Image: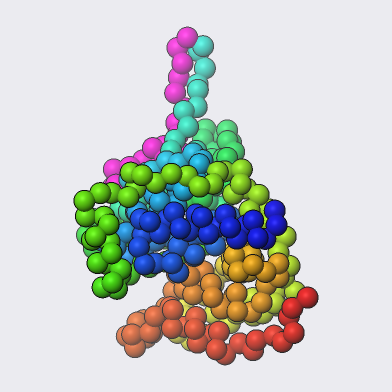
Amino acid sequence: MPLDELHETARRIAANVERVLVGKPDVIRIALVTLLAEGHLLVEDVPGVGKTSLAKALARSIDCTVSRIQFTPDLLPSDVTGVSIYNRQSGEFEFRPGPVFANIVVGDEINRASPKTQSALLECMEEHQVTVDTSTYRLDEPFMVIATQNPIEMEGTYALPEAQRDRFTARVSIGYPDQQAELAMVDEHAGHNPMDDLQPVSDGETVHRLIETVRGVHMAPEVRRYAVDVVAATRGVPEIRLGASPRATLHLVRAARAQAALSGRDYVVPDDLHTIAVPVLAHRLVLTTEAHAARRSATDVVRAVLHRVPVPQGSRP
């Protein structure tokens, strides 16, 4: 697919989502970057800022299979992946697919489910397959999990394990809108829900072509080395107890290619890595107690690493 066609398709999807999520173009762009990077998105913020609306609007903008899972403490792994049921007529077990068998899976309040249920998503997110009773079932492509969680209300919630967080390509926080955007939202949304009129502007086949195009975006050896150096630098910072993993390096490279393609370029520059470094890396870092006491955040640490690691020169092909 030509880059101008990719850019136009992404613009239509972003405009469609912005009809629901007003005044948050940067958040929508990260969501599109994650989609084109074949990744998964974690939306973490306080209640009422549009976490679920972002996930549902992006899902509805693409004419493909969509499912929604409301995570609760009593949810079982089989409620996510599916279950084998005995058929008396045939005398055999039949597999009934769960809601994870969709192109886009919206997981609402993922941290309200137990770690046992959360772990049901590990294989799905990493390997795009489900194993039930020794049988393995492939998931359709494209496949993306968009999960939301509330970081403030901790009663009745379970923190996401490091292995779970590491499988999310990016994490975004929507934040409160400015007064002008909130006023526009009141004028347009108070008497009518724009989600009711949202129509698809693309489909699964087109998204698959977009992903194939992003895979072909050139990344010079100097830029690849820069990505490795940035991730490796997070493992030597005294304020960090657990640095970013090699999986984080792969996600950073894929997201940088998607960022470059959305910018209309068929090659990656260091600025692409800078743009997506915080959403891709910050949620994977585990800070020390001293860092928390000093009120240092993972975002601050990632920005400090970007400032310290030398930027390669002449990386354009």
Is residue 39 or residue 115 the one in the foreground? 39
Give residue 7's position: percent from left, percent from top: 60, 60
The answer to whether residue 122 is above or below residue 66 is below
Q: Is residue 206 covered in magenta?
A: no
Magenta residues, as a range? 71-89
Task: From the top left corner, tell me how far across and down residue 150 is, in percent.
Answer: 30, 61
- Please tell me which residue is depicted at 49% across the width and 64% down the height of the picture: 29
Count of marks, rendered view: 0
Q: Position of residue 156 (x, y in %)?
A: 24, 55
From where the camera sits, is residue 210 visible? yes
In the foreground, 130 or 207: 207
What residue is shown at x 39% (from left), y 80% (from top)?
297
Residue 165 showing in the rendered view: no
Question: Where does the image place residue 178, in percent across and percent down from the top left?
Answer: 29, 73
Q: Residue at x 75, y 74 (%)?
A: 220
Q: Quadrant of residue 265?
A: bottom right
> Which quadrant of the view contains residue 260?
bottom right
